[in-house]
Image (cartoon, coloured by chain):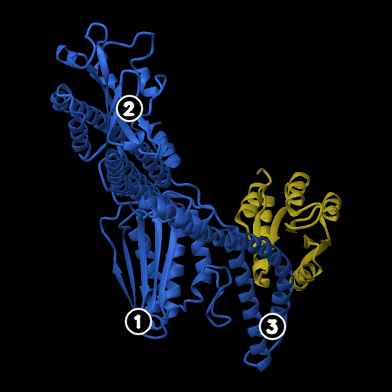
Amino acid sequence: MFIVLREIACSARTKMRPRTLKFKVGLYVAAALAAAMAVFTVLVARYQRAELIEQASEHVAQVSEVITRSTRFAMLQNQAVYVDRILQDVANQSGIDRVRIFSKDGRIIHSTYPPELGTSVDRKAEGCLTCHQGEKPLDHIPLARRSREFIGTQGQHLLANMSVIRNEPPCAQCHQDAKSKPVLGVLDVVYSLDGMDRRLRASVFSVGGVALSFIVLASLGIGVLVRRLIYLPLRDLETGAQRLAAGDLGHTIPVRSNDELGQLAESFNSMTAALRDAQRENDNWARTLEQKVETRTQELRVAESEAARGEKLASVGLLAAGIAHELNNPLTGVLTFSHLLRKKMPDGSPDAEDMDLVIQETKRCAAIIRRLLDFAREKKPEKEFSDLNQIIEETERIIERPAHLRDIKIRKELDPSLPLVWVDADQVKQVVMNVLVNSQQAIEKKGTITVRTRIAPEPKRADPLTEPVRMVEITVMDTGCGIPAKNLPWIFDPFFTSKEVGKGTGLGLSVSHGIVRAHGGLIEVESTVGKGTTFRVYLPLEPEAGTAELLRDGRAK
Amino acid sequence: MSARILIVDDEDIVVRSCLRILAGADYDVDVARGGAEALKKIDETPYDVLVVDIMMPQIDGLEVLKHAKQARPDSEVIIFTGLSQSETALRARELGAFGYLPKPFEPDEIRLLIAQALAKRRARGERPAQ
């Protein structure tokens, strides 16, 4: 009930709030209980009334019987005063409204209510009709029908019982014989039902009160039950659903019972858990995807710079061919005429020295152009199984002497178990030479160059789009000046050089890079300014799949 | 009779260089400033040695070499080029060139090569049976 009230207050507050389940259950239960209680109260009241009326009827019948018996003697003695006295005494009893005796013709001959003495009653009156329906009055009527209920002149609720006074042999002293006149008169005892009505009303009130308190208690109980069993779980579900809709997947709702709503709550929780898992998985995927995108972007960037470098190389090739063609013709003239002029100058003269310089520098120009052309040509590697350690030994021997002169120690840590490698020995020699020369030039005075070979501890991929393969690793480590980080991305670009003009063309590392790439390998470099630089050249250990098959077929033939 | 030499190049400076280098020697030096002119001159005159540049417009040095070897099998051809490409050198060798000289060359180099070519030719001339 209190829920209903609260609900009404609530709906008054929110106005738009629709009638909730809580409200409906409360309303219907209260209405049903009220109806049941009303019916119960009415039935109880009617039953009680019937009971009381019956009791009253019996009581009045008994009183009537008592009067009949107690007045018998006075009647036989014809002592009307005694009869009156007895009637008066009986009528003094509480609840008795009046006692009266009708004569056979309907005249009131005795009454405890004096004003009506001597008056006659109409036979057609309601009270008389019980017996006087036909011509001949009924001789006998059953006890139950002898009493009648009616409303008195002053509005009192009355119950009257009529009993016939029969003509018996002893009556013959005063009355005619019994055969001609069997009934002498009627004794009418009128009983007031007002007391009974009061009791009945009080009873109805108390029953109604009990019923009302029952309804209140039952409503309270049902309200508590509805709240605990339905409202709270539903509210939990609603809150859960709202938070879920708002994206809060971490919220679980309490499982309050193991009934259907409890199961629903459990299902809801497992649904959120499943969603949570799904989201976590999604997040993981998104993260993985992000990482993949990141890696791919990185790889693409590398590929892009490779492509850019390749493009640069291609254009350098065209440029080199053009330059070579355009420059070599004039250089031919310069070289020829300076030689011819030089011949006319006496040896040792300043002019001769100048002209020697012109010749020397012209030759250097020619050499630069030749190297540029060599570089631009990009010779296809002619591979065969070669001993890498031997290649390194041979190359190292070439620079050993100039290195020694500059107090540079070359330390070799060559892996003797290194298998033969499928490379163009001349080109690899060029690479090793270029890297060694580079390292040597990085050392200003006194230092160490370490050359190491081994099989790379793990397969490497030459570029982001190829599968990793087993490679050999040539490490050239110097204790030179190092390369500033800002220069690292450019060191393999053609014409990039940190050496002063005239000391290098900036093609060595670029050529090396090109050769290593053509072999399906890669060059890595790490450097710390002031500490030194480490180049790692990786070359595939085995021929590419197609080549291997060709080789095998060739051998089979 | 002095040896007849034809210089074939479209570049003035190269032609002039060659002329100056060979000026002191006892050679009869002629010049063609392009492939077409060279072919014409080869047909007209039996040169002992031809010095031909590879890169020329329209008719290039290899064409001239082919024609010379066809029309005058006795003459020796020296190829020079601004592009020192081994493929071209190899191809020239296949077509019967005597020598290959990358530009820029030193005066002595061309002198030596021409002398060698003439020596070879002379040697062949002494043994006509070959």
Taking the image as shown, residue B60 lies to the left or right of residue A493, namely right
Q: Is residue B120 left or right of residue A64?
A: right
Q: Residue furthest top?
A: A179
Residue name at image x 63 percent, y 84 percent: A357
Quadrant of image for the N terminus of chain B: bottom right
Q: Amino acid at mark 2?
A: Ile
Identify the residue at horizontal 51%, vertical 75% (top origin).
A487
- What color was chain A assigned in the picture? blue
Q: What element does badge 1 sit on?
A: strand
Q: Is residue A483 visible?
A: yes
Say which label, 2 or 3, has the lower sequence index. Answer: 2
Between the C-alphas of marks 2 and 3, the distance is 191 Å
Give the number of the mark in front: 1 or 3: 1
Q: Could you say which quadrant of the image residue A320 lies in?
A: bottom right
Q: Label 3: state its secondary structure.
A: helix
Residue that carries the numbered disc 1 in the rendered image = A447
Labels 2 and 3 touching (C-beta < 8 A): no
In this rendering, the count of numbered labels is: 3
Tell me whether marks 2 and 3 sit on the same chain: yes
Residue, disc 3: A343
* Mark 3 belongs to chain: A
Residue A480's label in the rendered image is none
Relative depth, front residue between A368 and B121: A368
Kind of residue at badge 1: Gly
What residue appears at the point 40 percent right and 36 percent down from the top-left corner? A153
